[in-house]
Image (spheres, helix red, strand yellow):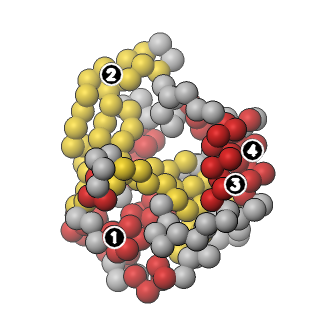
Amino acid sequence: MLKNNGVVLRYIREDDIADYSRWLTTETEWGDWDAPWEENNPHEFLDRQKASLSKTPEIHWKLEIDTLVGRHIGWVSSYDLTGSVEGLAVGIDIPPIEERGKGYGRDALALFMAYLFEKLGVGSLYTQTWSGNTAMVRLAEKVGFRVAERLEGVREVRGSRYDALTFSVTREEFFSKNPELSGLQVLFDDID
């Protein structure tokens, strides 16, 4: 378990599956912001979450977000942009609308990034979004990301065109912006 201000990051548990089922079927508004141009199969996504229950990876590429009072509010994840760990990108989803705007996203994403920087020893991390997702753009900037690439007008969302954005941050830039997270590697050995 990793803690940062108002959030806890932890590995997936059996009782999280009910939350995922609800977020994929009835409380789906979050999907309007997380790559809405992509077709997602809720059953495949849910099956992947169920399959991950039985795994204990050496590196946690995805972690669940809880508030300090134990409310499961979303997840942070990572994905490969280049075929190398040096091209690792991070993402975050907080489906409950009422849990957004409270600083949980910043705390969770920054903690996950510190975890990846420490565990992997990479020099940079990335994130991607679209220019219409202003909440994610602001969050990326808060944790230290800067726009590395902008592809103008390539994302169509709800009938409008938006820019595709790729952000990057070096290890040094990140820990300079988030000094409270440097030196926490002792915590990263005991995620439950």
Q: Which mark is residue 50?
A: 3
Badge 3, how many Cα within 10 Å: few under 14, some, many 20+?
some
The amino acid at mark 4 is Ser
Q: CA distance from mark 1 to mark 4?
A: 31 Å
Instruction: Give the foreground label among 3 and 4.
Output: 3
- Where disc 2 sits, the SS reads strand
Pointer 2 or 1: first along the chain: 1
Answer with mark 3 or mark 4, whichever residue precedes in sequence: 4
Q: Are marks 4 and 2 in contact (CB under 8 Å)?
A: no
Location of residue 173 (image quadrant): bottom left
Dot 1 crowding, Cα within 10 Å, few <14, some 14–19, many 20+: few
Residue 120's image quarter? bottom left
Check disc 2 and give the amino acid type: Val
Residue 154, label in figure: 2
Q: Are marks 2 and 3 in contact (CB under 8 Å)?
A: no
Per the image, label 4 sits on a secondary structure element best described as: helix
Tell me the residue that label 1 is attached to.
Answer: 120
Q: Earlier in the sequence, mark 4 or mark 2?
A: 4
Disc 4 packing (10 Å; few <14; some 14–19; many ≥20): some
Q: Residue at x 45, y 41 (%)?
A: 135
Name the spot of residue 50 as percent of width and height, x first.
Answer: 70, 54
Q: Is residue 76 visible?
A: yes
